[in-house]
Amino acid sequence: MRALSKRETNSHRLTNTPEPIIFVNRMTIPRRLRLLAILICWGFLSFAQGPTKRFGWDCRAVEKDGWASIAESKTLSAQERVGLTEIVASQLRPFMSEMNIDTEQQLRDLAAQTSIKAVDLGGNGSKQYLARGSVSSLCSPTGNCEAWVFRPDGEKYSMILHRIATQTFTIQSTVTNGFHDLVLGQHGSATEQGLTLYRFDKSKYRRIACYDASWTVLGKDGEFHDLKEPRLTPVICTVR
């Protein structure tokens, strides 16, 4: 059987959410102890994700407008266009063969199709860029795409967040170490979405906690009913 390449592995992650793996010896550990170990690990992982209290997310605050490809953006200077194209290309370069890219020019052409949006995460007038893949090789059939956040680093750009399965960005009102917290959304179904909370640690954004957002609830009548606001449930983070 052919081993999966790095890019195929990432693509697999986009469409398949892995379950937590707990290594136990089924032959020697009694069933009750196995269950206890699972519960302990589940609780530890949930605790390790960080605080989940008082988490709020406004689904209407998702960054929908102002996106454009690097190649077609009318607000980028020539230097910004070159710098953003290069930083995206640097992220994709290790996977050129898996993506059937033969030349550096083809790589840059693909990178230039990446959708970007300029934002001010620091609230001080500086620009950072939300970036999201827009071609099939970087997205799943459900619309979850590879995503990044870039910021200027001298004459170039550096990556401060990367996630392989993202559909939406939300800039939170809360601020950590000078930058607004971010919530990245992953499409689950017509009535559910996965949310991942990130906070800045002075150099990069770090994953803090994950939630399921559901717009339906099972009523006492046994039927599902629509909700005006999503119900947020803490879950174990599985997609990076």
Image (tube, rainbow, N blue to C red):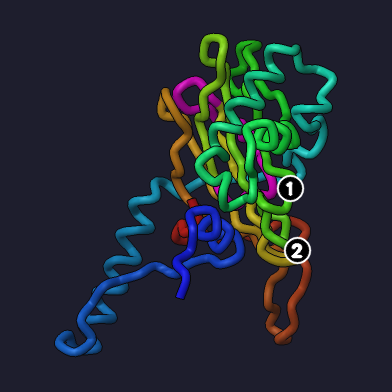
- Which of the 4 image quadrants contains residue 34? bottom left
**Front position in the image: 227 or 161:** 161
Task: Work out whether residue 115 can be spotted.
Answer: no
**SS class of the residue under badge 1?**
loop
Q: What x and y, as percent, mark residue 187?
A: 68, 58
What numbered label is drawn on residue 135? Answer: 1
- What residue do we see at 52% from left, 29% from top? 159
Left or right, residue 89 beside residue 203: right
- What residue do we see at 44% from left, 70% from top? 19
Q: In the rendered structure, which segment of residues is drawn in magenta?
A: 164-179
Picture quarter with the N terminus:
bottom left
**Front position in the image: 11 or 211:** 11
Q: Residues within 10 Å of mark 2 (few under 14, many from 20)?
A: few
Task: Kindly identify which residue carries mark 2.
Answer: 227
**Front position in the image: 34 or 127:** 127
**SS class of the residue under badge 2?**
strand
